[in-house]
Image (cartoon, coloured by chain):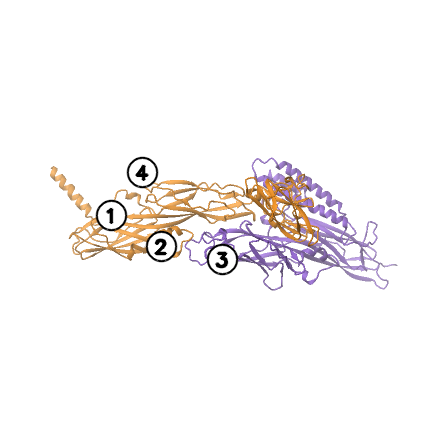
Amino acid sequence: MQSKFFFLIGVFILLTSCSKYPQNTSIGGEEFRVGSEGIAVAFLDARNTYFSDEQMQLQLLIKNEGAYDYPQGKISLSGFDRNIMHLTAEELTLPALQGKNAYLAEGDFAVVDVSEDAPLTVNLGESYSTILQANVCYLYKTIATPTVCVVYNPLDQNICQPEQVGLGSQGAPVAVKQVSTETLRDRVRFTIVIENLGDGIVVQPSDESFAACPYGLQKSDSNIVRFSLEINGLDSPSCSPGGHTVHLNNGIGVFTCTFTLRGQETYTTPLKITLDYGYFSSFEQEVVIHNRFGSSSGMYTTTTGGLNSQGSPRGIVSGATSGHGENNATGTSDSEGNSSGCLCSATNMQRWGGCVCLVVDGKNYFCNEGKQVIKLMKKAGDVVHYKVIGNNVVACGNTANPTASCPFSAQMTIPRTLFIYGKTSDGRTVSERCNVQI
Amino acid sequence: MLLSVIITLMSCSSKKAVDEFYISNEEFYRGTNGLFLDFSQGTPPEQTLENNLLDVVLDLHNQGAYFLNGFVTLIFEKDFLCIVDASDECVDYAVVSPSNKQIQQQITNKQQQIVGLYKQLDMAYALPDNTDIGALQGQAKQLHDELLTLKRTVPVINPYKTQLISLEGKSFFMPEGEQDILRYQLKAKLLPSLKTVQDTPLVVTACYDYATTFNDEICIDTNMNALKTFTGGCKVTDLSSSGQGSPIVVERVNVHMLSESNDYVRPVFEMYVRNAGVGQVINKEKIESACSSQGLTKQDYNAVFLQSFMLSNAAYSYVFNGYDEKTGREITDTNDRDLFECSPNPLILQEGKDNYFRCSLKKGVQDETFSTRQASYDTPIQIELSYGYQIIQQKKIRIEKEKVY
């Protein structure tokens, strides 16, 4: 009875191993090798709307949604003006993330903080809108292990028959879609069809291409996959195209590999197909940043100011403004030129934490980088005495002497563009361009 | 809270605003209107008798998006018409009343202070737990009161044929733009004995300085030779606009990305400008002359100044150095730190031709902003124009001899 039982078991094993309809998976854990995702990036709790002066405090949620463990990679941000959004220009290293497996059905994930050098700044227009991109370049692998029928003698089709095997996906963006087997005398040839099923771009798996990814990536770096095939007990196959690399056309690549058989037998066996490639994906987030101060440029024109009389300074931190760039804050104007009368723009406060102003004939002028014309009731060629005063600065000066004490006195011939300077207590240089006209 | 403050501010202004509620100025920077000027309905009468008084009332309305300061002058034949004083006697006139000029300067200063307060209020609303709002509201109200008082000190009927005007543009504080009326009292003089009827023209001219600001976003396209696989978020395209709330319109901006080297792009912009209004562009330096007997010379017409050109949050800019009257060109400044160069400035608008300013990043500027080692991205662009503008309205008056029976 016992021997009969073992015989039946043996027959069952034999039958299943020589099945006429081969399965496309044969190695343990294959149930996780499904899907066409690799590394996915999301903007964690990101808002669409921000305001100037805010910190974005961006966080990226990075997930390995494929089946390949610990891919090497990098993340960078693009699609925005770095003079507005001061997000790090450094590439972020892809965290070490396990792929999907029996214990981690969704794959591993990590949260990465994006550092900011400064808060958001919108100086032009009412708002700035853009599509922020998180770009990830990584090296990934696809492993497919379809069971194939290896036939020594083409006439011998009793154990299994070579045929075309269709595959779905293998837990990676590039998938083996189809394996066709062709029996030759003492050789077997496999024709493999692969396809980029993901939304990204396949990148040649070389150091140079990976380094160029994504911004320097050229078309010649793209759509190249390295492949290898393996059958236990057989030598490495000869493949076409040579060099074990295949180009994808319209996302699809085809290659063939021929194994030389050793034994005079027919059997089914797993064919291990490994695809190596780099992959580039971009994930987007729409962002609008509103200018808190409104668009003030060009809103004010004056008649009597004459030449260049348009435009009041934008975003003055305190105090009202009057024509010709004169600071006219109630109760703070100081003809002696101490710092109380020098009012800083929001931009200067953000950039330097202070600013410098020009004092002529007892009046304070905020120069606003030359956008504000300082019109003096003088003739061309007149020599004008002026002072440089500062707000939150420890030194004042002009081009010839940028770090003298405050207030700094000098003279100039007008009209001219005058550059004045200051130094903040933490050593930063504050500069201002003054457009002095007659 | 914000609504109540705006309502409060509106109620302080000289004209009531419409009931609509605006939270941004953006929508006011549309259209091609500037100053609307016309005779009020029924004034002056189409015909009058000699030695009779007649009212001339002008409606003024700043329908654009910018503050407006300038002059309005009445032109008539002195043989048939005159302006009268309080005792209805014909008077000679100065071009502009000196006292009015002083008041006007004070009005302008007050307006500028109000604009400053608006900005502070705008900022205060955005900041949480800001305790300055009440104080700022109080200051704004006080300034508005002072402004009204100043405006009342300008005589409603004055014997000067040229008057100063100052009108606020459309904004969310004044969504319709400021309106005003000017009144002149004229008298028809006695006709010569042989004349029984005389037709005489009455011309009113407004001359003012105005601005145009064009704001948009353009693409810094770093994929110049189209070899890149990842092109980024945008592609370079030309911009167009139907108007920016002023009669001079930046109607198109053509964008070109030239190669500075393999590693950098050099953006070049062509900004097409058109007079879309009903008036005449004049030299902004000579608006008083344009509204006086001094008049203008041929070269004072059609000059539009590029006040500034800003790119990438104003990190890259061109700022006008000033006008050299001798050469008719921009003053050369060897200390100029502008990273863009623009020409011609001023631009003389020519009928039937493409009129454009050209601004290009100076050669040799190799900043990361323009590096090709990055993806394409959108960046804000701002173009500010300034100019004088003149509009004219006229009517014919028939003066008849009084019949004596």
Q: Which residue is more in the foreground, A305 or A124?
A: A305
In primary-sequence order, the first of circles 4 and 1 is 1
Cα distance in 3D space between marks 2 and 3: 30 Å
Q: Secondary structure at mark 4?
A: loop
Between marks 3 and 4 in the image, the one whose residue lies nearer the viewer: 3
Q: Is residue B14 visible?
A: no
Q: Are tags 2 and 1 found on a single chain?
A: yes
Residue linked to disc 1 = A23
Along the line of sight, the residue nearer the viewer: B105 or B319: B319
Kindly indicate which chain is depicted in orange in the rendered structure: A
**x and y, in percent, of residue A75 in the image:** 41, 46
Judging from the image, what is the letter of the chain drawn in purple?
B
Host chain of mark 4: A
Q: Are marks 2 and 3 in contact (CB under 8 Å)?
A: no
Disc 2 marks a residue whose amino acid type is Asn
Q: Chain of mark 1?
A: A
Q: Quadrant of residue B249?
A: bottom right
Asked whether the residues under the numbered discs 4 and 1 touch, taking CB atoms below 8 Å apart as contact, a structural biologist would say no
Name the element at disc 1.
Answer: loop
Q: Nearer the viewer, mark 4 or mark 2?
A: 2
Q: Determine which of the numbered discs, if any, sits on residue B64 in the image.
A: none
Q: Residues within 10 Å of mark 1 (few under 14, many from 20)?
A: some
Q: Residues within 10 Å of mark 3 (few under 14, many from 20)?
A: some
On what subunit does the disc labeled 3 rest?
B
Give the residue pinned by disc 4: A103
Amino acid type indicated by mark 3: Glu
Residue under disc 3 on the same chain as residue under disc 4: no
Q: Which residue is mark 3?
A: B260
Determine which residue is flagged by label 2.
A223
Tell me how far mark 4 sits from mark 1, CA to CA: 24 Å
